[in-house]
Structure formats: C-alpha cells, structure tokens
Image (cartoon, helix red, strand yellow):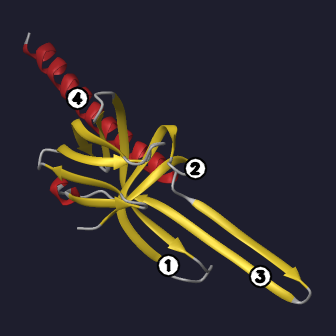
Amino acid sequence: MRRPLAAALAAGLCFAAAAGAARGQDAGARARELAAHFNKDKHKVKEKRGARLEVFLEMRGEPAVRADATEYTGVYESEPDYKLDLRVAPDGGAEGRGTEPAPGGARGFTLRGARVSGAVLAGTKVYDDGTTERLEAVFATLTTRHSPDGAGTSLFGLGVVFDSPRTTGGGFEVTKLFYARKR
C-alpha cells in the first residue's frame, strides 16, 4: 500500500516541478517576445555626385531580469511627457499611476492587480474615465548603435506593446512605447 502511495506522491511532485519550470520558461519566452518588438535595423547608403551618405541604426531590446523584484520600482518616462510611477513589492505585486498617448493628449491610468513575473509586468490599466484595458510589458535594456563598430548606448526601462495602436494628439499612430527609467 505504501509503495503505490509513494510512487503517486513522487509523480505528483515531479509534475508540479515540471509545471513550475514550464511557467518560468514561458515567462522568459514571453519577455523575449515582447522585447523583440523594440528591435530595429536600418542601413542605407546613398551616393550622388561623388557624395556618400550612410545611415546606420541598430536597436536591440533584451529582457532585464532582476533577482529582487523591488529593483523595478521607480519613475519611468517616455517622450513626450508620458510617465509611469511604479512601485513593486518583494513578492512581485505592483501598483502605480501613469499616462499614455491619446488623441486629446496624455491619458491617465492606474494599475490594478499588477504583477511582475521574471521581466514581465502584467495587470489592468484603469483609466480616469473608468474604462479598463489589459497591460503586458517587459522590463528591458534597449541598446542603440549608430555605427556598425560602435559600442552604442543602453537604456533600462519598461517596454509597452499596445494591443491596438494609440493615436497621439498630433495624429501619429503609436504601437509601442518605451518608458526609460529616470530614478
């Protein structure tokens, strides 16, 4: 009687460990997928009447996983004047207030039920008018290079990919927004 019970218990523990590892792998894969939205490559060369103009731009987004979730706490800003004030607890629970693009100017929201898992922030945005929308974003390091052999510059921040594009006050469509950490 004890052997089947021990075998069932061992199988259950193995299943639980495998499920936990799969969730961790899924969070890492989702973080890489979200960070990849910020990748960009551009290399153009134009020659006209002996003059050569070369344009090079490479941007790479890499998930920035921190061992201590509270390290994500801070004030994040994106141009022009979109902000996110985020507080993250040691258990990964998060709360904050922010603004994002909208046709009439910046639109304010509060985070509800937000949680950090790996480098992914997920929760619900509750707008000032009471409407809600799902939020999924990645804490990432965005590295930009302007020459093929240059080291480039890196920024740590929060990359948000919108489910549906946002229209700014100037009529531009925004599909993603990178909030760089200011403090």
- Mark 1 or 2, which is nearer the eye? 2
Amino acid at circle 1: Gly
Q: Earlier in the sequence, mark 4 or mark 1?
A: 4
Amino acid at circle 2: Phe
Q: Which mark is residue 28?
A: none
Question: Farthest left residue?
Answer: 2
Which image quarter is the N terminus in? top left
Q: Mark 3 falls on what kind of element?
A: strand
Amino acid at circle 3: Leu
Q: Residues within 10 Å of mark 2 (few under 14, many from 20)?
A: few
Amino acid at circle 4: Ala
Whole-angstrom CA distance, mark 4 to mark 3, is 58 Å
Whole-angstrom CA distance, mark 1 to mark 3, is 20 Å
Whole-angstrom CA distance, mark 4 to mark 2, is 47 Å
- Mark 1 or 3, which is nearer the eye? 3
Question: Farthest right residue?
Answer: 49
Q: Mark 2 falls on what kind of element?
A: loop
What residue sits right under mark 1 in the picture? 152
Whole-angstrom CA distance, mark 1 to mark 2, is 28 Å
- Which residue is drawn at the image coordinates 12% and 48% (left, top)? 89
What residue sits right under mark 4 in the picture? 16
- Mark 2 or 3, which is nearer the eye? 2
Whether tag 1 and tag 3 are in contact, CB under 8 A, the answer is no
